[in-house]
Amino acid sequence: MAYLHEFFYKMDEKASVTIHDIARELKISASTVSRALNDNPRISQATKDKIKSLALKMGYQPNIIASNLRNQKTNTIGIVVPLINRHFFSSFISGVEDVAFASGYNVIISQSNDLLEKEKKIVQSLFSNRVDGLIASLSMQTNEFDHFQLFTNKNIPLVFFDRVVPELEAHKIVVDDFAVGFKATQHLIDQGYRRIAHLAGPTVLNTYHDRMEGYKEALRKNNLTVEDELIIFNRLTRMDGQEAIKQLLALPHPPDAVFCGNDTSALSMMVYMKKIGIRIPEDFGLIGFSNEPFSEVVTPSISTLQQPAFEMGLKAAELLIREIETKNKTQNYQTITMPTELVIRESSLRNAPRSA
Amino acid sequence: MAYLHEFFYKMDEKASVTIHDIARELKISASTVSRALNDNPRISQATKDKIKSLALKMGYQPNIIASNLRNQKTNTIGIVVPLINRHFFSSFISGVEDVAFASGYNVIISQSNDLLEKEKKIVQSLFSNRVDGLIASLSMQTNEFDHFQLFTNKNIPLVFFDRVVPELEAHKIVVDDFAVGFKATQHLIDQGYRRIAHLAGPTVLNTYHDRMEGYKEALRKNNLTVEDELIIFNRLTRMDGQEAIKQLLALPHPPDAVFCGNDTSALSMMVYMKKIGIRIPEDFGLIGFSNEPFSEVVTPSISTLQQPAFEMGLKAAELLIREIETKNKTQNYQTITMPTELVIRESSLRNAPRSA
DNA sequence: AGAAAAAATGCAATCGATTGCGCATAAAAA
DNA sequence: TTTTTATGCGCAATCGATTGCATTTTTTCT
């Protein structure tokens, strides 16, 4: 008889096998099947064996959706980043995914494309999909945060990283951008550059704001004046970098070095300067941010700050999952500051011998 | 009275608002609420308005899980890639995400880390999560495909890309690796290189296999002999590239050019050769594959093949979603071949003037 | 053997949204 | 006014798995 059913399931594989099918076959109740498959001690070993082996034979695959609904838990975490296709973010995600997978969580990923409206929709959608927790880095446009209240109101764990805002009461994984901005600038000063410009991103975002403040502080500490005309704000694209360096070089009293908000803009500055014959680092010092893969291999190689993206992803996922699994409503939000390494390469090393 | 309830919901936001709560409040049935929220014509406009406005006031958020269970549809598509944190794949994913978002689909992303076992688990898990469709690129280890039968058996749309195998009956988004391998090799020949090596990935994967065959064909067409000692197989990491070039240069009769399976290995070859004083492209020609961001900006810049990763992602998602939404069980599998552009840069341009 | 205790399993409700069918009430036709 | 026909809405089942609370079966003890 069982064989008859087996045959039936083979014929019509489209109809999914459920615990009820198994139960019917074995003339027992669905509850027992459910418990057996979950190794509930209330079920005898003999029945468990029978059930499990039949489940295998029938090609049973649990319907996680049903389970999720009943358990009010999806084992899914959401991620919102500005753009997946960027080294820092994809490395971060890779870290999150590693931890998530090891802990039995799925990861739903969305990109805001740096648009506030899209970010809002995404957050809403992830909420409706009942993710167990959310990891987010804000879009460049984000200047309001009500959409995250869906999560905070219901005490759903929330971890921000990189681009965060102080207002938000949530866990945060960041780097000490102030210290880093300071360190980068100090390095340029140590190398003998005296008129140092800064290319900053939107300072609504803490990360760009803090880097800039660190930059200013370094100048002050070294008795150099902070000059507004040496600080340029834009979105740090390739285009932006080129525009910025043109603008800076056109000043009556141009800078002799720049600390850029990212490597992309630093690179485009470098390309432009090479073209018009400015030597780096002899005539002009350059330091970027975030250590893109290309920075190491271009000529001259670009000094930069190395953010531990992958490790930040690991940390974020660990923190989030711990929060999910221990519903300890400690309104005790952690801010984890990750170390950032100054990677000194050719573009800012004025007096040292250059390697091949 | 309604105000009382509103107050209640404000107090205990942890309890989610359901259609039943709205129904109770309005003293109507949950069915009506459901229909109203879905703009079912059987409900009068007046009732709809009442319901919608109350829903808003109460902060109702539909429980997609419940909806998914009932509708047997999750509006979610799964993606499996070897590694998220790689330009080609993250660009591809970015493309998928764009289309998916616009069509109301979520994207669950997993990485196999090029491990077959992990790939199996992922596919299983995505199935259990009842994704409406799956997009996959195989791991380097994948030499069996049974795990995908979960999807094919139940006619769940499946699209492979980049790393695919002919055995699989499914839609495929690929580039014409044979033609591309041919084109790259022909280009080196045109530039006057005569003893051309090839660094290949695992040839279980069509993409590496076809590229190699294209390479061989180009040699033959130009009356050059295909020599086994000039073809090296490995996993194309940085390390692998360096090992390979050492091995090639140690040959009694070393090559004067290499066509590499990816840009990473090409770059590491270049770095090594620069170090030992081999001039590129004068002494040695080099061409990579996949146009990593760094390839354009290193010195010399690396010639390569540009795969339209983002566009492939768009196409894959479009194809998959169309398949999902028109349950046309056309066992009529499409293979879409995307154009691949030969990007000629300095590393293979022997006689042309070099730009800055 | 009979009663009490322990072990194994079943019943039915639940999670929240959806939908076929049927029953009202109201509008239109006779 | 009575009958017909829309129109608006509710009942209850469903999706598949889980679980508190029985109930049945088995084991143990007197």
Image (cartoon, coloured by chain):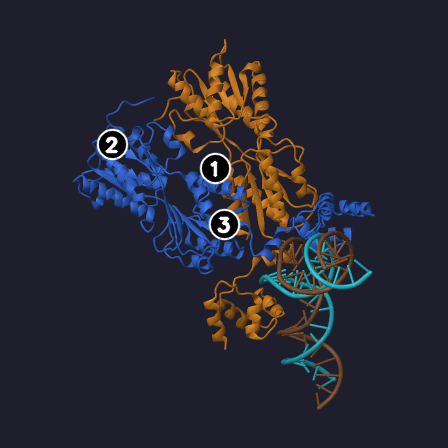
Chain colours: A orange, B blue, C brown, D cyan
Tell me the subunit letter for badge 1.
A
Q: Which one is in front in this view, the residue at disc 2 or the one at disc 3?
A: 3
Q: Is residue A179 above or below residue B310?
A: above
Per the image, label 2 sits on a secondary structure element best described as: loop
Q: Mark 3 — residue? A: B78
Quarter occupied by the C terminus of chain B = top left
Per the image, label 3 sits on a secondary structure element best described as: strand
Q: CA distance from mark 1 to mark 3?
A: 18 Å
Q: Mark 1 — residue? A: A85
Q: Mark 2 — residue? A: B284
Q: Which one is in front in this view, the residue at disc 1 or the one at disc 2?
A: 1
On screen, residue B218 versus residue A200, left or right, reads: left
Q: Is residue A213 above or below residue B230?
A: above
Report crowding for label 1: few under 14, some 14 to 19, many 20 or more residues within 10 A (C-alpha): many
**Marks 1 and 2: same chain?**
no
Tell me the subunit letter for badge 2.
B
